[in-house]
Amino acid sequence: MKKITYLFTINLLFSCFLFVSCSDDDDTDANVVTSSILGDWTVSSVTAPSNATEQDWANMTISITGSDAGGTLTSSDGPDCGNPVMPETTPWIYTDDTKTMISRDDDVNMSISGLTENAMTLSFNVNYDFPALDPTKGFLESFTYSDDTNVREDISYPEGIVNEWPMGDANDENGGNVSISGGKLVWEYTRVLEAAIGWEFENGIDISENPTLSFDYQLPLGTIFSVYMFGGEGEGQLFAPDDYSLLLGADGMNEVSINLSSSSVMEGADPNTSSMEEFYGFYLIAGLTDPDPNSETFGQLLPDAEGSLLHFDNINVGGVSLCTESSVSGDWTFSLTK
């Protein structure tokens, strides 16, 4: 009888131990999930949909704050068009008691996997279309073509938009060679004194709300540059460096933004009478001068600038968002570490 009682006591104690241990484990698992997703995270890698526009996520950080009831997710240092994928700020809540998925306020649910104190993976689907480019409000050319594109023959535009690649002069009727390299337009000078590239809009576009022309550029020393434009029954021309500044001879690309509604301050320039409500086109005109101050031809147009390279990208009239040409829809995976 004593033996039976002893064994019963042992079994009862063992059962209580298991019960307490299981209860403690359940509490620990819930606490680990909650505490582990909170904190500051670094994006270690991103797997994007196959058709997504390439973007640089390398510097992004994500901060998750809150409690069991939810909280706030913020991201910083992401790419320009990354907000629909990983918002700069959004509330979040767990979708159920398993705490393996969180929901954002844009109806995107992010599945949590591989969760430890120092790492986790977020997987989710994004279904988003950037606002379409309205051709009546602006124009954007970001040269997202492959490097083997024949610029003069392969690039075309919607009906009503006509473009001119480098137009030449008596020295060279072509005005130079044009190609695509790394998503940029490369204009190789030949023997022209000056040449131009440009776009015309048959029906006119209304850029009165944002009458700007911006573009990225890399131009050699000695480049003289102007923008010719026309709208309604008027026309105008703006000159560097009088009306805007260009950084010449730089190793990389730079950006300039030009107010097309202003008149040139250059002495003797005609007033700008172009209509911003009926803007019909513009040309980027470039010439190369002798940059050597010790030369007898310093500042004069060089008739033989063959081989000089001019780079252009993101030519934008009317302040069009560069994200309009991006694609972000599909399945995403973010690997995060602390």
Image: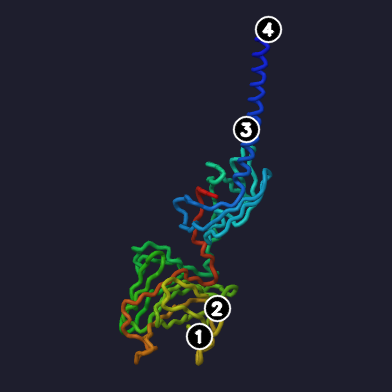
Q: Secondary structure at mark 4?
A: loop
Say whether disc 3 or disc 4 marks the residue closer to the N-terminus.
Answer: 4
From the image, tell me which residue sits under label 3: 25
Q: Amino acid at mark 3?
A: Asp
From the image, tell me which residue sits under label 2: 259
Q: Which mark is residue 242?
A: 1
Say whether disc 2 or disc 4 marks the residue closer to the N-terminus.
Answer: 4
Left or right of 314, for residue 116:
right
Q: Position of residue 232 (x, y in %)?
A: 53, 80
Nearer to us of marks 3 and 4 is 4
Q: Where, by quadrant of the figure, is residue 179 drawn?
A: bottom left
Determine the CA span between mark 4 and mark 1. Answer: 109 Å
Neighbor class of circle 3 (other Cα within 10 Å; few <14, some 14-19, many 20+) is few
Determine the CA span between mark 2 and mark 4. Answer: 101 Å
| Residue 61 vertical placement versus 7 (above, below) | below
Q: Amino acid at mark 2?
A: Asn
Q: Amino acid at mark 1?
A: Asp
Q: Residue at x 62, y 44 (%)?
A: 35
Nearer to us of marks 2 and 1 is 1
Of the pair 243 and 164, the residue shown nearer to us? 243
Q: Secondary structure at mark 2?
A: strand
Say whether disc 3 or disc 2 marks the residue closer to the N-terminus.
Answer: 3
Left or right of 17, for residue 143:
left
Q: Position of residue 53 (x, y in %)?
A: 47, 57
Neighbor class of circle 4 (other Cα within 10 Å; few <14, some 14-19, many 20+) is few
